[in-house]
Amino acid sequence: GAGVSQTPSNKVTEKGKYVELRCDPISGHTALYWYRQSLGQGPEFLIYFQGTGAADDSGLPNDRFFAVRPEGSVSTLKIQRTERGDSAVYLCASSSAATDTQYFGPGTRLTVL
Amino acid sequence: AQSVTQPDIHITVSEGASLELRCNYSYGATPYLFWYVQSPGQGLQLLLKYFSGDTLVQGIKGFEAEFKRSQSSFNLRKPSVHWSDAAEYFCAQGDTGRRALTFGSGTRLQVQP
């Protein structure tokens, strides 16, 4: 079946601009996660949704970052006033209630010039 | 806070040789442990996972891992490496109290012909 999809695959923006990154989880998966992976590092947790609500947003670095999942399926990660340090690959994952296994999408590479 | 250590940043092995990638996790009452593989430009693919039970876990592509609570380790092994195994490997930890995964910094595997 279809896996986790993320759009766009690449996003180039200028410092100070607003960006939105989209994640479409595996159908039926109730849990959705966002991670950020900087060059040469492992992914770092940002936020976790169970259904429509953010169950854990302790990884969001500051209030410029925000994520929503209004209908419990697709999620959007929003970054305001982007900074060069936000450049990274943003990964989305989803899991079902039956297992705690997270399945990852291909990621969105964000470059802030 | 949880932490995952992968002591080897880069490993080179000859094709057909055996492989062991090291992973040490921080103490947790009920650690959930994972190995993921990431090829260039690709998302993370799950190789195997340990939740409980048999401490020797079999995964895809001929990989296995052994959970050793006394050593806080979850090392990944393969008896005979193929050139297509060249990639970055990440160990990750979750637990029952927190759904977010904590990743190690990764080990890059090169395979020599």
Image (spheres, rainbow, N blue to C red):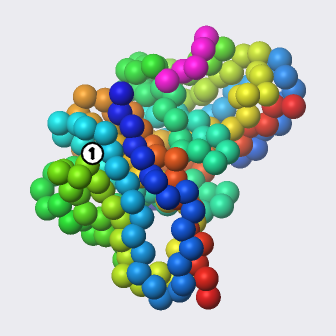
Q: Chain of mark 1?
A: B
Image position, residue A7 (x, y; %): 67, 41
Q: Identify the residue at horizontal 50%, vertical 58% (top origin).
A: B8
Residue sitting farthest toward the top? A63
Q: Identify the residue at horizontal 43%, vertical 28% (top origin).
A: A48
Image position, residue A83 (x, y; %): 77, 22
Q: A91 and B29: which one is in front?
A: B29
Give the magenta range: A59-63
Tell me if residue B109 comes above or below residue A25 in the rendering.
below
Q: Identify the residue at horizontal 65%, vertical 22% (top origin).
A: A78
Image position, residue A103 (x, y; %): 44, 49
Q: Work out whether residue B101 can be spotted.
A: no
> For the residue marked with disc 1, what is the amino acid?
Tyr
Is residue B67 highlighted in magenta?
no
Tell me if residue A6 comes above or below residue B2 in the rendering.
below
Which residue is labeled 1 in the image? B32
Q: B48 and B31: which one is in front?
A: B31
